[in-house]
């Protein structure tokens, strides 16, 4: 069965600090897809990234970067030079297989960035 | 703005009542997913439709039902409401019939409060 673990319930940082949000997943499939979403205080879920299991290249998008390591079943998310607007709940999610019909979400990590 | 539109944004209703949540997917997307977010259960997959047909069911109660219409909008019907049904209900959409194939975009959610 598929499972996503976000062990960090809450993280507090001061603005301009770098912060890494951890995501560990479990799946029996060799083909799977990983996602990150941001949920700001307003409540909507904002898509950040999708990565397939065959692409282990790290990705950078502005201040955001993602580190995918199949050897440790992790897909960690780093925010560089954090800003107050980054304060949100961040969710990691997994879709299993080429015909998986759902995303299984982790419990989320609350990120608080203080000025 | 994800392009996924959900109405209503907020809804307060009494126990035993029935409500309908509506979702318009992004232009060109054929898949619609419904998720429930509650404090105790987190984000849970309810059901998926693809081009008018039900494709997958998750943890959806028998009191809940959904459909996708020919114009691809979807409705989630919640009946015999209980206090525990109070939650944020998300609709999401994607192009493909399976979850990992493309990015999945979520709407802003419908906040349901049952009193």
Image (spheres, rainbow, N blue to C red):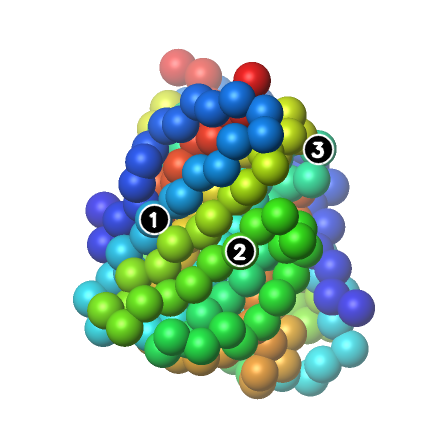
Q: Quadrant of residue A115?
A: top left
Q: Chain of mark 2?
A: B
- Between discs 1 and 2, the one toward the N terminus: 1
User: Which badge, 1 or 3, is on the more N-terminal residue?
Assistant: 1
Q: Nearer the viewer, residue B21 or B18?
A: B18
- Residue B40 against residue A60 in the figure, above or below: above
Above or below A93: residue A79: above
Q: CA distance from mark 3 to mark 2?
A: 22 Å
Which residue was labeled with disc 2? B65
Q: Quadrant of the N terminus of chain A?
A: bottom right
Q: Are marks 3 and 2 on the same chain?
A: yes
Question: Which label's residue is closer to the chain start, 3 or 2?
Answer: 3
Seen in the image, is B99 located left or right of residue B95?
right
Q: Residue furthest top?
A: A115
Dot 1: what SS? Answer: strand
Which numbered disc, 3 or 2, marks the residue closer to the eye? 2
Q: What residue is shown with label 1?
A: B22
Residue at the (38%, 75%) spot, across then down: B52
Q: Is residue B42 visible?
A: yes
Q: Position of residue B37 (x, y in %)?
A: 56, 40
């Amino acid at each position: 069965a598929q499972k996503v673990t976000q062990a960090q319930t809450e993280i507090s940082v001061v603005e301009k600090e770098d912060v890494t949000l951890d995501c560990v997943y479990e799946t029996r499939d060799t083909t799977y897809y990983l996602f990150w979403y941001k949920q700001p205080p307003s409540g909507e879920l904002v898509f950040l990234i999708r990565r397939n299991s065959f692409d282990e290249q790290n990705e950078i998008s502005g201040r955001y970067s993602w580190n995918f390591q199949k050897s440790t079943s992790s897909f960690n998310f780093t925010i560089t030079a954090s800003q107050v607007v980054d304060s949100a709940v961040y969710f990691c999610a997994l879709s299993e297989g080429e015909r998986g019909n759902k995303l299984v979400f982790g419990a989320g990590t609350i990120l608080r960035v203080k000025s | 703005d994800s392009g996924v539109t959900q109405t209503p944004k907020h809804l307060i209703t009494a126990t035993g009542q029935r409500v309908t949540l509506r979702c318009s997917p992004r232009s060109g997307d054929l898949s619609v997913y419904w998720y429930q977010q509650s404090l105790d259960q987190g984000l849970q997959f309810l059901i998926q439709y693809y081009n008018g047909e039900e494709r997958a069911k998750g943890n959806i109660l028998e009191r809940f039902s959904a459909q996708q219409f020919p114009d691809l909008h979807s409705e989630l019907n919640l009946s015999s409401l209980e206090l525990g049904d109070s939650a944020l209900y998300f609709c999401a959409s994607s192009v493909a019939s399976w979850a990992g194939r493309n990015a999945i975009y979520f709407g802003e959610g419908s906040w349901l409060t049952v009193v």
